Image: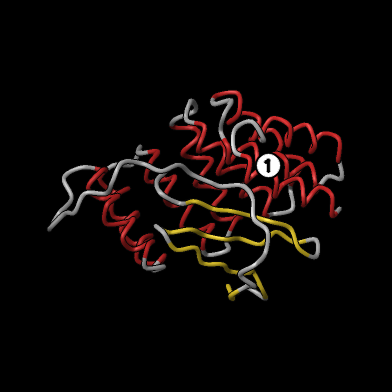
């Protein structure tokens, strides 16, 4: 799926997205259909996606999905999500069964605060590569941001069953349980997460205690 590290926290009963690119963390809030800066000192937890090998630079026509993703990633780094989606669509004409491209499609749409549209593409990626936990994780976050926390639990659990130490999916599962007012289950996720990523676990714990 590529390098999108999506962090999330709850404020005023809403999910706020925080995207980290490289060494810089930029915070955005979904507000009336737009993304606006949010306060930089807010708590964060959870991530979507995993860090892939360093991008390769390409000139001219991409000869592989990997090369195309290098260009897509550059657009995403510049927050030009429409440009990224344009490249993805072109790539899908050549590689219509690439789960990576569908994963990037979902990721770009999620960054545009369009989880309903992102869901379709994450589901396609998961259909093409059902053993890849990141795609189920993407489905989980799309559902969570659509206020379908109960359904997101199943997807996060699918990701965790495939990769028991998946920090992003564990954080997402904890957030889903918080949204469902299932505090004991959320605390159970916290207990699992604290042995893997203490920072993510601590911020999840703070969210649980605020509810």
Q: Is residue 104 above or below residue 83?
A: above
Residue 13 falls in which quadrant of the image?
bottom right
The x and y percentages for residue 127 are 49, 32
Foreground residue among 123 and 173: 173
Question: Which residue does the image show at 14% across and 54% down from the upper left?
Answer: 61
Q: How many marks?
A: 1
Residue at 73% over, 32% down = 191
Percent across and percent down for residue 48 are: 54, 46
Instruction: Residue at 32%, 48% (x, y): give it.
Output: 92
Q: Who is closer to the viewer here, 121 or 112?
A: 112
Element class at badge 1: helix
Residue at image coords 46%, 57% = 108
Quadrant where the N terminus is found in the figure: top left
Q: Position of residue 15 (x, y in %)?
A: 70, 59
For label 1, the residue is 201
Residue extending furthest left?
Answer: 60
User: Eyeballing the image, is 130 above or below 152?
Assistant: above
Q: Is residue 142 above or below residue 129?
A: below
Q: How is the image coloured?
A: secondary structure
Q: Is residue 120 left or right of residue 98?
A: right
163 horizontally vs 154: left or right: left
- Where is residue 71, by image quadrant? bottom left
Q: Picture coordinates of residue 162 (x, y %)?
A: 55, 24
Q: Residues within 10 Å of mark 1 (few under 14, many from 20)?
A: many
């Amino acid at each position: 799926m590529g390098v999108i590290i999506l962090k999330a926290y709850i404020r005023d009963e809403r999910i706020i997205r925080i995207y980290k690119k490289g060494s810089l963390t930029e915070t955005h809030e979904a507000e009336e259909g737009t993304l606006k800066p949010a306060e930089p000192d807010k708590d964060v937890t959870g991530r979507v996606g995993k860090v892939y090998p360093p991008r390769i630079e390409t000139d001219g026509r991409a000869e592989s999905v990997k090369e195309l993703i290098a260009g897509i990633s550059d657009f995403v780094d510049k927050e030009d999500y429409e440009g990224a989606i344009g490249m993805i669509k072109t790539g899908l004409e050549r590689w219509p069964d690439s789960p990576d491209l569908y994963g990037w499609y979902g990721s770009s749409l999620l960054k545009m605060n369009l989880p309903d549209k992102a869901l379709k593409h994450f589901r396609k990626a998961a259909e093409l590569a059902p053993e890849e936990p990141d795609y189920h994780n993407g489905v989980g976050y799309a559902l969570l941001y659509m206020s379908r926390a109960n359904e997101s639990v199943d997807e996060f659990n699918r990701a965790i069953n495939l990769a028991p130490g998946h920090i992003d999916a564990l954080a997402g599962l904890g957030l889903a349980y918080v949204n469902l007012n299932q505090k004991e289950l959320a605390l159970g996720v916290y207990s699992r997460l604290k042995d893997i990523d203490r920072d993510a676990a601590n911020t999840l714990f703070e969210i649980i205690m605020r509810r």
